[in-house]
Structures are given as structure tokens and as C-alpha cells.
Image: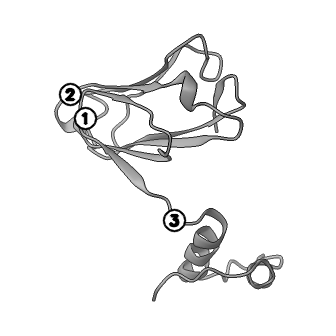
Amino acid sequence: MADTVRTKSALLALFPDNIIGDISAQDQRDFLVSTMGSITRTAVNAATYNLATDDIMLHVTYTVTGTVVITLLTAQMNDGRVVHVCDAGGNATANNIVINTEGSEKISGQDTQTINVNNNSISLYSDGSNWFIF
């Protein structure tokens, strides 16, 4: 079945006190498509990558080959920006994904964050000054 973008009232009708857990997988997908829209993934297949203006989902396959360093550029940071980084190569334990910032910005108070578990991911949002993990 194809994903369907639903109106707010249609979505609210799906989820009234779902105590018994009877929401179908398709209804859940429709909810995500309706609220988040379509997300384009960006393949990261090199040892270094600088965040681009339209990046939302970084699909990191290079961990099959080696360590990856992703830099969150100062110019790409704005309040409310969300970025997801995923170890799609499935080898982050051996070949880490290191996420850093270009300037003095922090990531949840740290200079860098590292994905070092196979197939793991990290989601970040910006307040316009720093990045935070959620």
C-alpha cells in the first residue's frame, strides 16, 4: 500500500488514546509521511564530509572502508535545524563516525560526538548557536 498524506483531523482520529495498541504499521507510516514529509538521504561514501544546506539524513556507507569525519559547518546551522547521521555501512565499531563542528559550537557540550557501534545513529538539532543530541 502506498503512503498517504493525511490531514491533521484524520491523523487525530487515528490516535485517540491508543491504549490497546491497535494502530497498523501503515497508519504509523502515514503519520510519519504526513508530519515529516519526504526525507531525502545523502550518501556519505568518503572519509570526510561537510554538511550541506539541504542535508537532513546522512546515510554513511564509508564505514565499510574506513573512519569518517563529518563536519557541521557554522554557516549551515540555524535554529530548529535537524540532522540525522546513520552508520549505513554497519562497521562503525571498527571505523568510527566522528561528528565535529567547524567553529566553537558544541554538540551537547562536547567538541565532538562519535558513533562507534555498528548500525547506530545519532540525531541532532540546533538552537542556532550549538547542536544537541535528541
The first of marks 1 and 3 along the sequence is 3
Amino acid at circle 3? Ser
Residues packed near mark 3 inside 10 Å, few (<14), some (14 to 19) or many (20 plus): few
Q: Is residue 54 above or below residue 97?
A: below
9 left or right of 50 in image: right
90 left or right of 56 in image: left
Amino acid at circle 2? Gly
Specify the label residue 63 is tagged with: 1
Query: Where does residue 44 sit, x and y in percent of width and height?
Result: 30, 40
Camera sees residue 27 = yes
41 left or right of 23 in image: left
Amino acid at circle 1? Thr
User: How much space separates mark 1 and mark 3, taking CA atoms?
Assistant: 26 Å
Kindly identify the residue that appears in the image at 37 percent across and 48 percent down. 42
Kindly identify the residue that appears in the image at 59 percent across and 22 percent down. 107
SS at badge 2 = loop
Residue ranking furthest to the left: 65
Between 21 and 80, the one lying in front of the other is: 80
SS at badge 3 = loop
Residues packed near mark 1 inside 10 Å, few (<14), some (14 to 19) or many (20 plus): many
Kindly identify the residue that appears in the image at 73 percent across and 81 percent down. 7
User: How much space separates mark 2 and mark 1, taking CA atoms?
Assistant: 5 Å
Residue ranking furthest to the bottom: 1
Camera sees residue 15 = no
Labels 2 and 1 touching (C-beta < 8 A): yes
Residue occupied by mark 2:
66
Report which quarter residue 31 is drawn in: bottom right
Labels 1 and 3 touching (C-beta < 8 A): no
